Image (cartoon, rainbow, N blue to C red):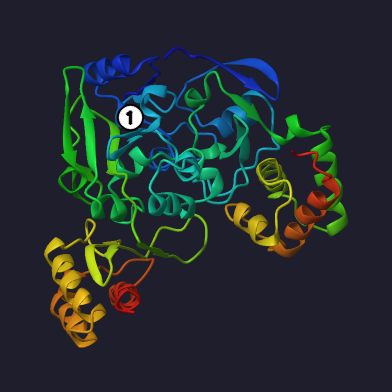
Amino acid sequence: MMRHGAYRPETLAAALACRRDTGALPYAGGTDLMCRGRRWMGVRPRFDAPLLFVGHLNEIRAVHRQGEDVVIGAGCTLARLCEDDTVPGPLRRIAGEMASPAVRNLATIGGNVCNASPAGDTLPFLYAVGARLVLETIAGRREVPVCEFITGPGTTGLGPGELLTRIIVPAAGWDVAVTERVTARRANAPSKVSFLGLARLDGHRVADLRIAFGAVGPTVVRRPGLERDLAIALSAVRSGRGTVADVSALIDAHDGMIRPIDDQRATAAHRRRVALNLLRCFLDELCR
Amino acid sequence: MNRSIDFNLNGRPVTAETDPVRRLIDVLREDFGLVSVKEGCGEGECGACSVLLDGRLAPSCIVAVGAVAHRAVVTIDGLAGTPGFELLAEAFTEAGAVQCGYCTPGMILAAEALLRAHPHPDEETIRRYLAGNLCRCTGYHLIVRAVALAARRGGGIWG
């Protein structure tokens, strides 16, 4: 079998040219890639393609505010993500709970997106706020919503020659933000279930509600229609015109959206119950 | 990428003449003889292979050596002799925080990284910061106590 080497371009343009010419595998933080290519102690890891080191490229590491948005470089590490106060609060909190301090110093948000793991911890937030991804080739760029980019467990629409360079999220804050991940150990344990709930309030009215679940399906579960219905029902409860039973009925009518699997981390039944309990907890808080 | 990888190792500029896809841990142990860097899980979960990369804690088993080009790597060998190391070593000894010793280099580096960021950590902060380092002798309380002791005696040498 051929031993593939590695490339370390000095600029983004050179990296894009390299990606087009060689089909090399982007290596940003490497934390997931190196586990996948791992063999034995002292033995060189093995990959199906050459590696393309991109983690050192300053062009894709910065975070900045742009109008109503925050533009996050795909090469921004989780550690920098949680230290940067330009980054929306819930995302900072999520990044600060992922993996371990050491892994957070390497792992990048772009890697978390491109790995497209069902348990990818930044994904529920990115889905919930409708994050857009900037995908670049040497010839140009396109912008895709994250929910269209990720096509299944570990699969994405990343084209040949393309690199994910930026992740664009709205800068606006949330009045209520609940981020939960259920794991067996505090550090370095993939989520059994993750939950994200965001709300913007306007007096009694729930003006904007976002709900997303991770690790309970092939990709993040989000139902914008249900979010709208729940916002209306919650607004009614909060202004004394509706009952908590209406909210519960909506959850019961949609609980089929949570269809997890059994695996070594948790049973499907456990995941489903915990996911729905986290949702109820979040909605209870909004009823008050 | 050519096979000459320049980086700074324990304060000295070095060149690794090797395949950039090899793991940093293997290059440190085999090419530079730094066997203080221990392999535990081999997948970034246990922290035994921790090094400081540009001053930040990193598991060297999931880093390709090509990715450290032009960066600074510090192993516990590079820390030895610094006032911070002396304090930590003394505190680990006094608190009985070393049992089999396999996790110790990683624990000391994690403690060093913690104290640089938080010179006066409370117990919760210590536990959070060491959460990625496993001790299979399960001597966690003693390790946490040792780090707290070093911090108390540090008198701000970490910042």
Q: Is residue B49 visible?
A: yes
Left or right of residue B25: residue A81: left
Residue A222, percent from left and from top: 20, 61
Q: Which residue is mark 1?
A: A26
Residue B135 visible at all: no
Categorize mark 1 by other alpha carbons within 10 Å: few (<14), some (14-19), many (20+): many
The three-letter amino acid code for the residue at tag 1 is Pro
The x, y position of residue A18, in whole percent, is 28, 17
- In the foreground, B104 or A83: A83
Residue under the point 29% across and 15% down: A13
Q: Is residue A262 above or below residue A236?
A: above
Say which quadrant the N terminus of chain A sits in: top left
Q: Under tag 1, what secondary structure?
A: strand
Q: Is residue B124 above or below residue A58?
A: below
Q: Is residue A23 left or right of residue B151?
A: left
Residue sitting farthest toward the front: A203
Name above or below for residue A193 compared with residue A118. below
The quarter holding residue A219 reads bottom left
Q: Quadrant of residue A274 in the image?
A: bottom left
Q: How many numbered discs?
A: 1
Q: Nearer the viewer, residue A137 or A259?
A: A137
State which chain disc 1 sits on. A
Q: Quadrant of the C terminus of chain A?
A: bottom left
The residue at the point 18 percent across, 27 percent down is A160
Query: Is A160 on the left or on the right of A75, as rendered?
Result: left
**Left or right position of B141 against A80:** right
For the point 40% across and 18% down, the residue is: A8
Residue A172 appears at what percent x and percent y? 31, 48
B33 vs A99: above or below: above
Q: Position of residue B143 (x, y in %)?
A: 74, 57
